[in-house]
């Protein structure tokens, strides 16, 4: 077991509601010696994301004492990917970190890449795979053998049946259900509350029960 001083200080980048969820999960996990936040919005600097979690300007991050961990907590999938690339280039001393809330259930055989957020009450089943920067939000179920590509967001209360594949940067909306073996395409959006009964093609937005293409909706 490592001494508390060996644990990294975590930077949560993104000082909004999603950042609060990430910072809270990090604090609950006990995996970090402390948590600070940062954001590009100057209005957030000097405020607290949560009690004891100060929001620093990005320029202040390079001076923080190592070891350092970085988690990008931005709900928008393309922005999360872009910020992760930019911050990793500017802060090579920080390790991109996955945060796992202690009240998530993660199978011992699940494979989880860096930069993911696994929140309270969610379930990651056996042999499931999460790519970099994936969000599995409160109460979501990612069942056995699912493969979730990098930068996807599995929103609160989603149910993914076994062996579902979710493409890169896709959004599976809150409370939706995807039947087993189906594929949600890259950059696709499944609307909140939908039930998906067939594959959702890349870049499209579908919603409803059963899910159908949304005319004119923005994916
Ligand atoms: C599907 C979604 C992306 C569409 O957003 P949008 O492009 O802004 O679409 P609009 O709100 O303009 O709605 C377009 C039409 O789709 C309908 N619609 C929107 N979302 C819907 C949903 N989830 N289920 C059924 N119909 C929906 C609207 O009623 C509207 O119908 P109309 O043209 O007959 O009036 C969005 O509503 C959604 O469900 N996003 C998921 C959000 C989420 O879960 N985020 C995670 C938070 S942690």
Image (cartoon, grey):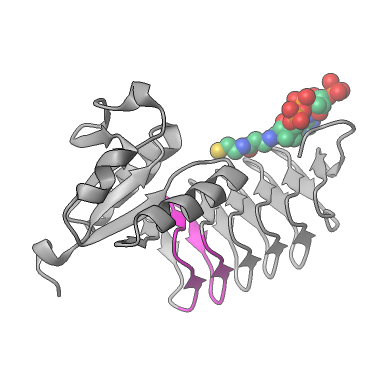
Of residue 1 and residue 74, the one placed in the foreground of this image is: 74
Residue 201 vs residue 164: left or right? Answer: right
**Which residues make up the magenta segment?**
109-132
Name the residue at 37% across, 57% down. 99
State which quarter of the image contains the C terminus: top right
Quarter for ligand 1?
A: top right
| Position in image of residue 94 (x %, y %) | 31, 60
Please state which of residues 65 and 128 is positioned toward the viewer in this rendering. Answer: 65
Give how far across and how far down residue 52 sits, in percent. 18, 36
Q: Quadrant of residue 150?
A: bottom right
Q: How many numbered dots are placed on residues in this image?
A: 0
The image shows residue 97 at horizontal and vertical percentages of 37, 60
Q: Quadrant of residue 69?
A: bottom left
User: Where, quadrant-wise, is the N terminus in this rendering?
Assistant: bottom left
Q: Is residue 155 visible?
A: no
Q: What residue sits 60% from the left and 71% below the top?
A: 144
Residue 4 position in % (x across, y down) = 11, 62
Residue at image point 54% right, 69% down = 125
Magenta segment's dominant SS is loop
């Amino acid at each position: 077991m490592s001494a508390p001083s060996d644990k990294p200080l975590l930077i949560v980048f993104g000082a909004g509601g999603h950042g609060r969820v990430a910072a809270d999960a990090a604090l609950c996990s006990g995996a970090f010696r402390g948590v600070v936040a940062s954001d590009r919005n100057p209005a957030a600097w000097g405020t607290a994301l949560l009690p004891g979690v100060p929001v620093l300007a990005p320029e202040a991050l390079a001076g923080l004492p190592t070891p350092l961990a970085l988690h990008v907590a931005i709900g928008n999938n393309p922005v999360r990917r872009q910020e992760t690339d930019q911050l990793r280039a500017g802060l090579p001393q920080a390790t991109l970190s996955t945060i796992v809330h202690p009240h998530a259930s993660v199978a011992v055989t699940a494979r989880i890449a860096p930069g993911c957020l696994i929140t309270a009450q969610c379930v990651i089943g056996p042999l499931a795979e999460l790519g970099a920067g994936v969000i599995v939000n409160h109460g979501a179920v990612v069942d056995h053998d699912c493969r979730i590509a990098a930068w996807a967001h599995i929103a609160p209360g989603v149910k993914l049946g076994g062996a579902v594949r979710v493409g890169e940067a896709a959004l599976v909306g809150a409370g939706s259900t995807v039947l087993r073996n189906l594929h949600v395409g890259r950059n696709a959006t499944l609307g909140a509350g939908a039930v998906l009964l067939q594959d959702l093609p890349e870049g499209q937005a579908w919603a409803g029960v059963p899910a159908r293409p949304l005319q004119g909706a923005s994916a």
